[in-house]
Amino acid sequence: MPSTPPTPSLFKRLLLTGAAGTLGRELRPRLKAHCEVLRVSDRLDLGAADAGEETMPAALEDAGAVLALLDGVDAVVHLGGVSVEGPFEPILQANIVGVYHLYEAARKQRVRRIVFASSNHVTGFYRQDEVIDARAPLRPDGYYGVSKAFGENLAQFYFDRHGIETVSLRIGSALPEPKDRRMLATWLSFGDLERLVVASLTAPVVGHSVVYGMSDNATRWWDNRCAHHIGYRPQDSSERFRAAAQARQPTLDADDPVTRYQGGAFVTRGPYE
């Protein structure tokens, strides 16, 4: 049975998948302020449940486990799956088969809103001298990017066919600070990540929306004008890290694909035979 519908600012039960990962560990304490119960899931160790939490380990490849995972849930923040480029088979199972199981479970359990952690790597083969928005054709830079492109297309299908709303977040580089000059454009602070996720959960109407996950950086390759209806307003900027990033990389090779393309090092990884 469907659970109590959420109010604009509070969910009765919110599910966070991938809760043991880097971003999951950051969002786990932050999301508890926005729900009565935070259900956390991963295939890795989740530790003990804190107050206001319930832990439900599950593998995304297990359709039955995912169906049970979404029982009684108002909305989902889906960070689960493989988060880096690598061989196809693990990505297939976690990010393609797994996200299908998630949406099928959402349909059966009548969950109406999903925040899907997509990636900037769905458009990684655009050049760094281009500015694109969510309407640009997909150009994945690896198997990981392909899997996230599949997830976005699946989200669109489940909205068109079943009315399940999704905000697909094309997350940039969510780290404490930019590691290099590329990340001056792609950086997403943890505070802005929280603001982005909460806006995606609480916007009144989203259909299937695509938002680039970046802070208010001076260098920008992505235009979020197609997502103003979400209400995301970043408050941080990579600019204060510019001098340090440029000192670490005083020169760049313009002929290097890692420098030329927005996907950075992902565009050169593989093959994996």
Image (spheres, rainbow, N blue to C red):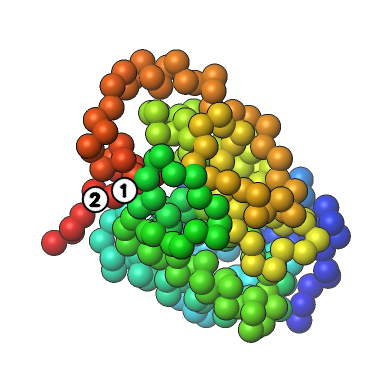
Percent across and percent down for residue 185 are 48, 35
Instruction: Say left or right for 49 vs 118.
Output: right
Circle 2 residue: 269
**Depth check: 157 or 195 in front?**
157
Residue drawn 61% across and 33% down?
216
State yes or no: discs 2 and 1 in contact (Cβ < 8 Å).
Answer: yes
**Depth check: 225 or 45 in front?**
225
Residue drawn 65% across and 55% down?
226
Residue drawn 53% across and 45% down?
222
Quadrant of the image containing the N terminus = bottom right
Percent across and percent down for residue 36 are 79, 55
Circle 1 residue: 266
Q: CA distance from mark 2 to mark 1?
A: 5 Å
Instruction: State the image quarter where residue 135 is shown.
Output: bottom right
On the question of residue 91 being in view, the answer is yes
Q: Secondary structure at mark 1?
A: helix
Reply above or below: 3 against 26: below
The residue at the far left in this view is: 273
